[in-house]
Image (spheres, rainbow, N blue to C red):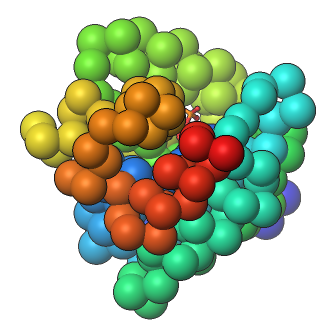
Amino acid sequence: MPELNPRIAVYTGTFDPVHHGHLDIIQRGSHLFDRLIVGVGNNPDKQTLFDIDERVQLLQQVTGEFPNVCVEKFAGLAVRFVRGEGARIMLRGLRTLSDMEYEFTMSLMNLSLDAEIETVFLMAREEYSHVSSSLLRQIAKLGGDLSRFLPVPVRAALIQKATA
Ligand code: ADP
C-alpha cells in the first residue's frame, strides 16, 4: 500500500452550507498542514438543502484565499477518501460535549476501519461554538440576521434558497 503523508489533512463534513465556524477550522488547519483538502460528503441517505455541487462551489468561493486548500466531493467511506488523497490525517472540529460523544465514536470506528489514519480535532473558537449549519438554515427561514456567521456569497445563497 502507498505511504500516507502526515503533512496532508482532509477536513470532512457536509457543509450545508459552509459557515464561519468551518472557515475558522479551515484557516487554522491550513497553517498546521502542508496541504488541506476539504472533503464534502455526498450521502444519499442525508437530505441537504444545497446539493453536492452547490456545497462544493460555495466552499471554493470562500476558500480561494488559502493557497494550500482545495475542495473535493466524495461519496462512501470517509477513511477511503482520505487514503485515496494520500493523507494520514482526518481533521474535525469540536464544539460541544454532544459533538464530543459523536466524534469520539466516529474516530474510534474510523480507526478500526483504517488504523493508519488519525483523526485530529481542533476546538471551535468560542464565538462560533454555538454555530451549526442546521441552526443557520432555520434562522434563514425565519428571516434572522446571519451576517456574523456566514460569508457574503453563502449568506446570499442561503437566503435565496430558504425563502424560495
Ligand atoms: P457533519 O455532518 O459531517 O458533522 P458538518 O458540516 O456539520 O458535517 O461539520 C463538519 C465538521 O466541522 C465537524 O467536525 C463539525 O464538528 C465541525 N464544525 C461544525 N460547526 C463548527 C463550528 N461552529 N466550529 C468548529 N467546527 C465546527
Residue 86 visible? The answer is no
| 97 relative to 22 in the view: left or right | left
User: Residue at (44%, 39%) from the top-left corner?
Assistant: 140
Place of residue 146 in the rendered image (x, y in percent of width and height, measured from the top left): 31, 47
* 63 w.r.t. 130: above or below: below
Say which quadrant the N terminus sits in.
Answer: bottom right
User: Residue at (36%, 17%) from the top-left corner?
Assistant: 100
Say which quadrant the C terminus sits in.
Answer: top right
* 100 w.r.t. 50: above or below: above
Place of residue 125 in the rendered image (x, y in percent of width and height, measured from the top left): 16, 44
Q: Nearer the viewer, residue 3 or 58?
A: 58
| 46 relative to 22 in the view: left or right | right
User: Residue at (38%, 69%) from the top-left corner?
Assistant: 152
User: Residue at (39%, 86%) from the top-left corner?
Assistant: 65
Q: Nearer the viewer, residue 84 or 156?
A: 156
Place of residue 41 in the rendered image (x, y in percent of width and height, measured from the top left): 72, 45
* 61 w.r.t. 58: above or below: below
Which quadrant of the frame does ligand 1 lie within? top left
